[in-house]
Amino acid sequence: MKKTLPIILILFVISLQAQTTESYPDTLNPKRLRTALISAGGFYVASMTVLYFAWYKGYKGTGFHWADDASEWMLKDKMGHFTTTYQVGNYGYWSLRHAGVSEKKAIWLGGTWGLLYMTSVEVFDGFSQEWGASPSDLLANTLGAGLFLTQQALWHEQRIRPKFSYHPTKYAQYRPDLLGENYWQRIIKDYNGETNWLSINIASFIKRDNRFPKWLCVSVGYGAKGMLGGTFNPPTYNGHALPVFDRTAQYYFSVDVDWTQIPTHSRVVRWIFKALSFVKIPAPALEYNRKDGIIFHPLFF
């Protein structure tokens, strides 16, 4: 929970220097490279400091240990790890290419930033008595980095992008300590309202001379609802009985936009599109879950 959306939000700032021109330079630009590396290092230190004071300071340290949490939150935490690692690698690649680093080097150096970042966070967990390093987290991180690296090496473009959306739910009010006390905390903490998507660019899988809109995507999503705890819903909170909710997986089908494929001559707009590359747009969606069957949402986020 602490290692997903907060890190992605930091990437909005990192992406300021990630991509401001339509094409990448042919030669290395030392000034841009230095800016990219200093920015990445600075935000690494800053974000780790924030994580320490927000999550680790109040708990005792211990020797490095493992504590797998694969059964918690109906895999929503793992989807967050997958998405975050992918996106950090994506921004890392953009930053290095903008500095004139070659395609091959940018793929393997920038594309692995997410894996290195998230692995270091897992080390923090390993030395915390409260958590412990999670093998399933490391697997999700590896898969996220692998998705970016494989596509960029094979196609030199990203045809399938992990994305994120959030909508408020009724569940957070019952466990504000765990699911958030206000709207902004709940975006980070309330897994019931978070949906993880794979957005697939249709035109990229068709012959290059096709007239299919290059920005139009189809998306498949995964969510879960009814969760008031990690592995089970407690019967009470602060001495008061909690409602009984079924923990239910949700599967979605929708349409989306590949922001990076929308043509524009504005550097500002182009940067905004790059920064928003992990956000799934609000759109009509079909949902399936075992409790309610098929549901049509005229507008879902």
Image: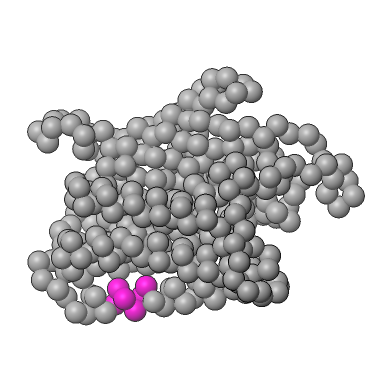
**Figure quadrant of the N terminus:** bottom right
> Of 242 and 152, which appears nearest the observer?
152
- Vertical arrangement, residue 107 with respect to residue 292, above or below: below
> Of 128 and 185, which appears nearest the observer?
128
Q: Residue at the location (58% across, 33% down)?
A: 249
Which stretch is magenta?
Answer: 35-40
Q: Position of residue 72 (x, y in %)?
A: 63, 47
Find residue 275 and report its image quarter: bottom left
Q: Position of residue 105 (x, y in %)?
A: 20, 65
Q: Position of residue 107 (x, y in %)?
A: 24, 60
Name the colour scheme.
Answer: one colour
Q: Residue at the location (16% across, 75% down)?
A: 29
Q: Residue at the location (46% across, 52% down)?
A: 139
Residue 272 visible in image: no
Residue 134 visible in image: yes
Q: Residue at the location (56% across, 44% down)?
A: 75
Q: How many marks?
A: 0
What predominant SS class does the magenta segment belong to?
helix
